Image (spheres, grey):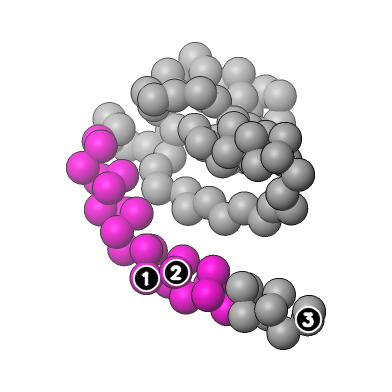
């Protein structure tokens, strides 16, 4: 299950434990609110998320914003290619 939190801060260890207890496998700060806003305007949505860090208390080191940004940068090109491919598939179906 994907859980959406408002952010803009990383989850605390207590929040991570709670999210695990309710069945969350991944957590994001913007995807859920962006989809809610888009659906309110009548848009169809497909979301992609990149997991950039383990939750607080799950990894061997404290969370680091620099490491999160580095992980996101590593996957940026692949994600862009995936989105371009999906958009091409949707266009070809019309």
Where residue 50 sits: x, y (%)? 48, 53
Write the start and end of the magenta stretch as one range: 64-85
Where residue 2 sits: x, y (%)? 65, 39
Kindly report which numbered mark, 3 or 2, lies closer to the viewer in this rendering. Answer: 3
Disc 1 from disc 2: Cα separation:
5 Å
Please check the rendered image and state whether residue 23 is part of the magenta-colored stretch, yes or no. Answer: no
Q: Nearer the viewer, residue 27 or 25?
A: 27
Disc 3 from disc 2: Cα separation:
20 Å
The kind of secondary structure element at disc 1 is: helix
Pointers 3 and 2 in contact (C-beta within 8 Å): no
Task: Indicate left or right for 25 with 53 as reference.
Answer: right
Q: Which residue is mark 1?
A: 77
Kindly report which numbered mark, 1 or 3, lies closer to the viewer in this rendering. Answer: 3
Write the residue at 49% across / 15% down: 14
Write the residue at 70% across / 40% down: 41
Marking on residue 60: none
Looking at the rendering, in which quadrant would you find the C terminus?
A: bottom right
Write the residue at 52% across / 18% down: 15
Marking on residue 80: 2
Q: Nearer the viewer, residue 48 or 42?
A: 42
Q: Nearer the viewer, residue 15 or 83?
A: 83
Q: Which residue is mark 3?
A: 93
Write the residue at 64% across / 35% down: 37
Q: Residues within 10 Å of mark 1 (few under 14, many from 20)?
A: few
Compared with residue 41, is residue 48 higher up or lower down, i.e. above or below?
below
Q: Earlier in the sequence, mark 1 or mark 3?
A: 1
Q: Kindly give the residue lying farthest to the top in the view shown.
A: 14
Q: Residues within 10 Å of mark 2 (few under 14, many from 20)?
A: few
Pointers 1 and 2 in contact (C-beta within 8 Å): yes
Q: Say if residue 2 shows up in the picture.
A: no
């Amino acid at each position: 299950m994907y859980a959406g939190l408002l952010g803009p801060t990383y989850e605390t260890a207590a929040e991570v434990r709670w999210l695990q207890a309710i069945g969350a496998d991944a957590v994001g700060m913007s995807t859920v609110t962006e989809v809610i806003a888009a659906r309110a305007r009548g848009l169809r949505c497909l979301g992609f998320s990149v997991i950039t860090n383990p939750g607080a208390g799950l990894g061997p080191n404290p969370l680091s914003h620099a490491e999160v940004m580095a992980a996101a940068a590593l996957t940026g090109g692949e994600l862009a290619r995936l989105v371009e491919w999906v958009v091409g598939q949707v266009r070809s179906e019309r």
